[in-house]
Structures are given as structure tokens and as C-alpha cells.
Amino acid sequence: MSQVHEIVGFVTAVGSSVHKFKVGDRVGVGVIVGSCQTCDICEQNLENYCPKMIFIYNSTDHDGINTYGGYSDMIVVHQHFVLQFPENLPSDAGAPLLCAGITVYSPIKYYGMTEPGKHLGVAGLGGLGHIAVKIGKAFGLKVTVISTSPKKEDEAIKKLGADTFVLSSDPAKLKVRNWKKK
Ligand SMILES: [Zn+2]
């Protein structure tokens, strides 16, 4: 297992109705481990808005027991909230995709920012922002990082492959930018 807000591990047992997984499968579980699965919101696959959503940590599970996320030795999760985790993806590199990754992937997908040539703006280059840059580049987008910190420019452009960098704390830098569409 790894991480606190998400878990990567192996299936040790399955219930009789489980059809997606078998014992020994390498799997990942993100931040959400439960919801009512019957309301209109859940039926639209928007469980993160369900009033009965259960977090992987610091929530009360269906059985009344507190959830402890990655501090647990073992957890019981409905198959709906479990994902196959690729064998060739290291746990420490892949686990953040189940939390920070889905947080930025979801709006990118929802707003159709998946076609090459579109222009993605990423405000802030922290834990979420750096994954947004990588996902944006993987989709073939033009990516601009907007940050208050000049120290982030090298990381954005050279390390992560962003196309442009805007230093938002410098009004002069904002003015000289050419925002015209190509
Ligand atoms: Zn629901």
C-alpha cells in the first residue's frame, strides 16, 4: 500500500457478487470509497456530489466504522470504487493519479480539453498543477502555466514541457503577453 488519500495494493478476497476483480489483482482506490449509488447524482456517475459520499479517510463507512485510508492494513471497498492498477506503474508514481490526478483530469475531460491544439491554462504549479501540465501535454494541448513565483518557470517549461509561462505577480509581464488567437 502507499499514500494516505489513495491506496494501491492487491485484492486479498472478493465477495460472491464481485465480477470486476479476482484475488491477486493489483488495484487502486481513490479518495471516494462509497456513496448511496441510488440517487440521481450517483446515477450520473457524479458520486463526488452524493450527500452520502464516503471518503477513504476520516469518514464513517456503511458499517459505522471510521475510515483510515492509507493508514489501514486492509480495507473493504465496493468494486464500483476500485480500479485495475497497471503492473508496470510504480505505486509511488501512480497513486497520486488517484487523487491529484483525477482532480485535474475530471475538468479537463468534462470541458472537452482532450483534443490536440486546444490551449490549457494551469493556475499554480503545485501538486495538482504539475499533473495538469503533464495530462495536458499528453492530450497534445498547448499548455500555459500561470504562477506568482518566477522560480517555477524552469520547472514548468524545461522539466514538465509547458509551452509558455506567465508570471502573474508582475503586472508588466502580464501586459506584454500577446493573447491573440493564432
Ligand atoms: Zn448518491
Image (cartoon, rainbow, N blue to C red):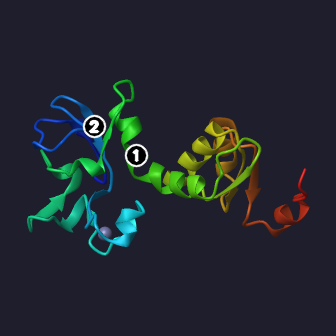
Q: Nearer the viewer, residue 73 or 60?
A: 60
- Tell me what residue is drawn at x 21 percent, y 51 percent: 78
Mark 1 residue crowding within 10 angstroms, few (<14) / some (14–19) / many (20+): many
The dot on residue 96 is 1
Q: Nearer the viewer, mark 2 or mark 1?
A: 2
Q: Nearer the viewer, residue 173 or 62?
A: 62
The dot on residue 27 is 2
Q: Quadrant of ligand 1?
A: bottom left
Q: Nearer the viewer, residue 130 or 106?
A: 106
Q: Is residue 41 above or below residue 176?
A: below
Q: Mark 2: which secondary structure? A: strand
Three-letter code for the amino acid on which mark 1 is drawn? Pro
- Tell me what residue is drawn at x 90 percent, y 61 percent: 176
Quarter of image, res 178: bottom right
Residue 174 in picture, x, y percent from top left:
82, 64
Residue found farthest to the bottom: 51
Residue 85 in picture, x, y percent from top left:
34, 34
Residue 151 in picture, x, y percent from top left:
65, 51
Sequence-first tag of 2 and 1: 2
Q: Is residue 98 left or right of residue 10?
A: right
Can residue 160 be seen here? The reply is no
The quarter in which the N terminus is drawn is top left
Residue 150 in picture, x, y percent from top left:
70, 54
Q: Is residue 86 above or below residue 129?
A: above
- Tell me what residue is drawn at x 38 percent, y 48 percent: 98
Q: Nearer the viewer, residue 120 or 20?
A: 20
Three-letter code for the amino acid on which mark 2 is drawn? Val
Residue found farthest to the top: 88
The dot on residue 162 is none
